[in-house]
Amino acid sequence: MPIGLLRRMPLGLRLAVLITLLMVLGMGVTSVTILVKQNEVRYKQIQDFGAALSMQLAASAVEPVFTNDQVALDVMTANFVKLPRIYGARILDKRGKILAQSGTRAFVTALPKNDGGLASILQTPPEVVAFSSPISFRGARAGAAEINIETSEHSRSYSNTLRVLLVTCALVTLMAVVVAWFISRYISRPITELLAATARFGSGDNELQSNTVERRGDELGQLMSAINEMGQGLLQKNQVESLLGRFLAKDVADQVLSQLDTVSIGGERVVATVLFADIVGFTTMSEQMSPEEVAEFLNEYYGYFTQCSRFYFGTVDKFIGDCAMVVFGAPKSDPEHYFHAICCAILIQKLIERLNELRVAAGKAAVMVRIGVNSGEMLAGVMGDKDRMEYTVVGDSVNLASRLCGESSGGQVIIEDAMYQQLAQDKKIVASSYKSIRLRGKALPSAIYTVEDVASEYRMPMEALIEDVIGDRSAA
């Protein structure tokens, strides 16, 4: 069997084939050994039997040969061939002349041997073996006695033995296949379970492993226990990753997980956009609520802020009381971060308007949100100390976004002059001058603008998302 084919076989079938081959090889070696020994015994028996009979004929023929008693020689050879398995007998003088002969005419010629023994084999059925023994008296040799012995009975015994061995080998081979299959199944079954377990690891199904580990005391049992522990470890890792994804934005969580061994305090300078969304008058509203109602209210609006930011590739940096801080362009780069931040702000305000319609219809007070957006250079990275870290952005641009949020009123989106000039060139937004404020580090007041809407071609996706959110809220 080619080695390559054997390697491509399943482990169970490979074990079955190898075990079967070993058992068949063992039976073959045993059978050949038995046959060789049987054949040696067969020829030894034929040699001993023929040598004894030829020596007996030679001993009986001593006196008739020396006295030239032809009648006695004829009677002797005639009576000798009547013995079982004697195919022929003859007496020769010392010159090789036949003095008396009885039996087959196709006599096997044999050279005289002093000790009597196997001379030759007639290769025509029935199988005949010739033996020769010298006729001598007191050192004087007068001739030789030869006999032909039929060995078909010995051959039949050898054939029967061969047939029994072949049948036995066939039965043992069949039994070997069955036994090898069960043995291979027993050995490969836990390995198959391990393969299935590792396949389930890839699909995230690690919790089932505690129920599938077989209690074994051998190396496979130790391996299965180790795999089970690894599965539990992977389960805990997945749980930690899932939990981390709830505390951090997905992009931030992925970045932290990819740098577990090298995460350090610090950051890199990026050009990004920051949005601050604050619920107006929340302190007054919360005075009329229980702590549970406050938490439920905040969680609801946090969810709205998160949905809107994700829709425009933003990352919720943190929730600060009733305020949400959203970053665009970090940690994941976004060439349109400034415009996406404005779209997100408009989407939040439009969504709040639709939600207020529902709240007013239900007899509840309307909720107003003020938003400040600013774009510029900032430092993005892990901040804190070795015991407490968080991913965030810091810098004057971030502080300005927070201040713009404070300058706005409910329902407004406020941006600074530099950002307005950049967006106004592309005619993607509808904005109007709001007022001038004095910024730190600048001698002259800076103009700020209120963004009323985005260009009409960008409104359709917003409306679709608002309908989805309202539909989900109504279904809940």
Image (cartoon, rainbow, N blue to C red):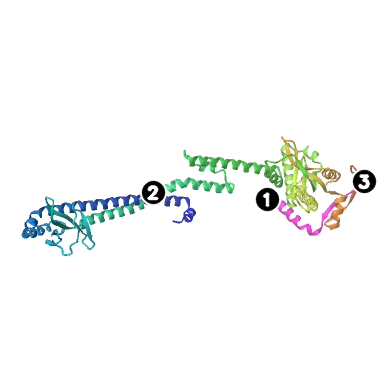
Label placed on residue 445: 3
Query: In this orientation, does residue 111 appear?
Result: yes
Q: Residue 152 occupies which quadrant of the picture? A: bottom left
- Would you call the spot at circle 3 few (<14 residues within 10 Å), some (14-19), or many (20 or more)? few
Observer-nearest residue: 21 or 279? 21
Residue 318 lies, in percent from the top left, at 75, 42
Residue 473 lies, in percent from the top left, at 70, 49
What type is the residue that disc 3 sits on?
Pro
Query: In this orientation, does residue 371 appear?
Result: no
Rounded to the nearest angstrom, the CA distance separating label 2 from label 1 is: 63 Å
In the image, is 121 to the left or to the right of 313? left
Residue carrying label 1: 475
Observer-nearest residue: 106 or 270? 106
In the image, is 120 to the left or to the right of 401? left
**Magenta segment: does it hold 465?**
yes
Residue 368 lies, in percent from the top left, at 80, 46
What type is the residue that disc 2 sits on?
Val
Observer-nearest residue: 52 or 313? 52
What span is colored magenta in the figure? Answer: 446-472
Q: What element carries label 3?
A: loop
Sequence-wise first label, 3 or 2: 2
Rounded to the nearest angstrom, the CA distance separating label 3 from label 1 is: 49 Å
